[in-house]
């Protein structure tokens, strides 16, 4: 069983997004302001749509933390959807016996039956036997990644007690690739954090913004690639003994399941196909009894375990399927040809996706760390950790 686990609930235009986290030992400092900073990072990004102008995501810690420290009890987090104000009638949880005409009109206006190709609409409607695609959209929307970033922030705040930190940056948007990497991770992080496309090179960032503008003008959307980096990890998170304990597999699942992510790579990733054994594997050397390597094609994982090197994960996000340029589709009401539904959307959410991936990686890493160390309090756990 997992040590750090959580469930979320909430719809895109419902009252709120909620998470309950179990497995946070007592004594860890958990700050609302730090969670809010992470939420703001997810909301930012050139190419995001109208919704981000409505929302200013902030979290409320509802339980499990007292005077800024975890008590060992489950932690409940909540983010209110500001947009709910405009959707109260449409997202009402109660059965309506005699709805007023204006309420019926509002509900009908927000109902739709024309499937968005690439989204969850078609399979979701068939699977759950839902005739209004609104019911599929509401939970399948990437809106729920807001509360996941809040959970990830709790995970990051725990990891930080052990000196483990991570960041993310964007390496491709559409066909614009980052070819020039600043020399150190510190520099990449600093530059990416200041960039509205999370790109560590100014010229590439300009080209990315242009590509987003062009796509927006054409009513189209853009995908891309991002990198998540975590440093200072101890050796031996994960295990080779069973397939479901391998940390690369767990990280891949966590990132692949972010809406719109189509590929996850660790270290050399897909380029490993081209590398000979002599080129791929990171040789070990020793100096003053300290082991070191000159390369990191493994991306910090060997045999399903962290190996003490920097963890490097790449993720590929497809272009968002909700788009102004309507694609050919069907109406699930009558199975006639139709144009796909469009409300509003982001042109590009790759920078946001990178922040979500960072959170998902932190959740897996903290679970592996707490599972390895055991214990119920920070004091107990720290005593078992070699810094
Ligand atoms: C999102 C909120 C959504 C979308 C986006 C992610 O808001 P709305 O649906 O009200 O415009 O902007 O979701 C998608 C693009 C999608 O396809 O699911 C958010 O908070 O990140």
Image: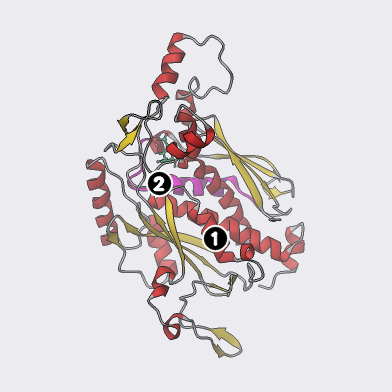
Judged from the image, the secondary structure of the residue bearing numbered disc 1 is: helix
**305 within the magenta span:** no
Tell me the residue that label 2 is attached to. 44
Q: Position of residue 163 (x, y in %)?
A: 60, 66
Q: Going 42% across and 49% down the picture, which residue do you hit?
A: 260
Mark 1 or mark 2, which is nearer to you? 1
Residue at the (66%, 63%) spot, across then down = 369
Vertical order, 334 against 304 (above or below): above
Q: Position of residue 198 (x, y in %)?
A: 38, 56
Q: Is mark 1 within 8 Å of ligand 1?
A: no
Q: Residues within 10 Å of mark 2 (few under 14, many from 20)?
A: some
Mark 1 crowdedness (10 Å alpha carbons): few <14, some 14-19, many ≥20:
many
The quadrant where residue 287 appears: bottom right
Q: Disc 2 beta carbon < 8 A from ligand 1? A: no
Specify the quadrant that holds the N terminus: bottom right
* Marker disc for residue 251: 1
Indicate which disc residue 146 carries: none
Q: Answer above or below: position of 59 versus 29.
A: above
**Secondary structure type for disc 2:** loop
Asked whether 31 falls inside the magenta stretch, the response is yes
* Circle nearer the N terminus (1, 2): 2
Residue 144 visible in the current orientation: yes
Magenta residues (range): 30-50
């Amino acid at each position: 069983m997992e040590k750090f686990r959580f469930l979320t609930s909430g719809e895109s235009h419902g009252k709120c997004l909620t998470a309950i986290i179990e497995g946070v030992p007592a004594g860890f400092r958990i700050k609302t302001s730090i969670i809010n900073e992470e939420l703001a990072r997810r909301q930012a990004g050139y190419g995001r749509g109208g919704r981000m102008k409505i929302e200013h995501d902030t979290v409320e810690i509802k339980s499990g933390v007292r005077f800024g420290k975890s008590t060992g009890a489950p932690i409940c987090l909540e983010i209110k959807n500001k947009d709910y104000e405009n959707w109260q009638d449409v997202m009402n949880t109660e059965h309506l016996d005699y709805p007023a005409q204006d309420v019926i009109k509002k509900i009908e206006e927000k109902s739709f039956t024309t499937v968005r190709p690439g989204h969850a609409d078609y399979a979701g409607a068939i699977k759950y036997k839902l005739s209004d695609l609104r019911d599929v959209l509401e939970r399948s929307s990437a809106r729920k990644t807001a509360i996941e970033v809040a959970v990830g922030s709790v995970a990051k705040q725990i990891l930080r007690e052990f000196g483990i930190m991570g960041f993310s940056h964007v390496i491709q948007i559409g066909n614009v690739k980052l070819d020039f990497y600043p020399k150190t991770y510190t520099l990449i992080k600093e530059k990416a954090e200041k960039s509205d496309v999370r790109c560590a090179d100014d010229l590439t960032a300009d080209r990315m913004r242009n590509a987003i503008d062009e796509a927006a003008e054409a009513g189209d959307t853009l995908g891309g690639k991002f990198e998540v980096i975590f440093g200072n990890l101890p050796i031996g998170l994960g295990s080779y003994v069973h397939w479901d304990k391998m940390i690369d597999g767990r990280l891949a699942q966590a990132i692949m399941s972010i809406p719109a992510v189509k590929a996850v790579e660790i270290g050399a990733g897909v380029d490993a196909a081209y590398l000979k054994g002599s080129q791929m594997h990171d040789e070990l050397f020793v100096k003053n009894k300290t082991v070191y390597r000159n390369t990191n094609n493994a991306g910090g994982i060997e045999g399903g375990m962290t190996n003490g090197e920097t963890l490097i994960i790449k993720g590929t996000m497809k272009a968002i399927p909700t788009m102004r340029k309507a694609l050919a589709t069907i109406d699930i009401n009558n199975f006639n040809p139709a144009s796909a539904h469009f409300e509003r959307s982001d042109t590009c959410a790759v920078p946001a996706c990178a922040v979500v991936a960072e959170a998902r990686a932190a959740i897996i890493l903290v679970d592996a760390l707490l599972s390895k160390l055991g214990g119920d309090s920070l004091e107990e756990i720290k005593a078992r950790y070699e810094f």
